[in-house]
Amino acid sequence: LAKPLEALLQQLQASLAETEGGFAGVLPSKAGRVTVSHPVFGVNDIPSIFRLMAAHEQRHGTQILQVLQEPGFPLGVKL
């Protein structure tokens, strides 16, 4: 199930490019009325989606720091 580091980096770069693309354009004049339906989080407006994205990224950042602090990580690799 583990993916090679290069594949993970490419996937991360593609995801980042897609996210940045979403911020590149000008929001429609009625953006405050736009909603997005999510199967878990329900119906949200654009500011709520941005907050969800920020919380999601913050959670992953915390997870990465926790893994990096684990004794013996990465197994068999010296940094």
Image: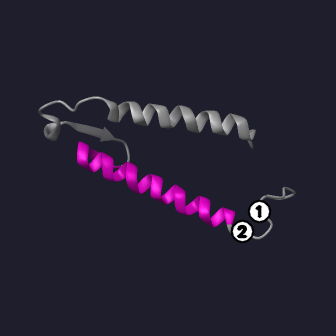
Residue ranking furthest to the front = 79
State whether residue 19 is above or below residue 76: above
Are the two marked residues, 2 and 1, in contact with CB atoms closer than 8 angstroms? yes
Residue 16 x %, y %: 49, 37
Measured along the vertical axis of the image, is residue 73 above or below residue 20? Answer: below
Colouring method of the image: one colour
Count how many numbered circles sit on residues in the image: 2
Residue 6, quarter of picture: top right
**Magenta stretch contains residue 28:** no
- The residue located at (35%, 33%) in the rendering is 22
Which mark, residue 54? none
Determine whether the residue tagged by mark 2 lies in a helix, strand or loop: loop
Which residue is under mark 2? 70
What mark, if any, has residue 73 been given in the picture? 1
| In this rendering, position of residue 21 left or right of residue 34 | right
In magenta, the rendered stretch is 41-68
The residue located at (24%, 42%) in the rendering is 46
Above or below 54: residue 19 = above
In the image, taking residue 56 as reference, residue 73 lies left or right, namely right
State how far apart marks 2 and 1 are (Cα).
Answer: 6 Å
Q: Is residue 14 above or below residue 58?
A: above
Q: Amino acid at mark 2?
A: Glu
Q: Quadrant of residue 8?
A: top right
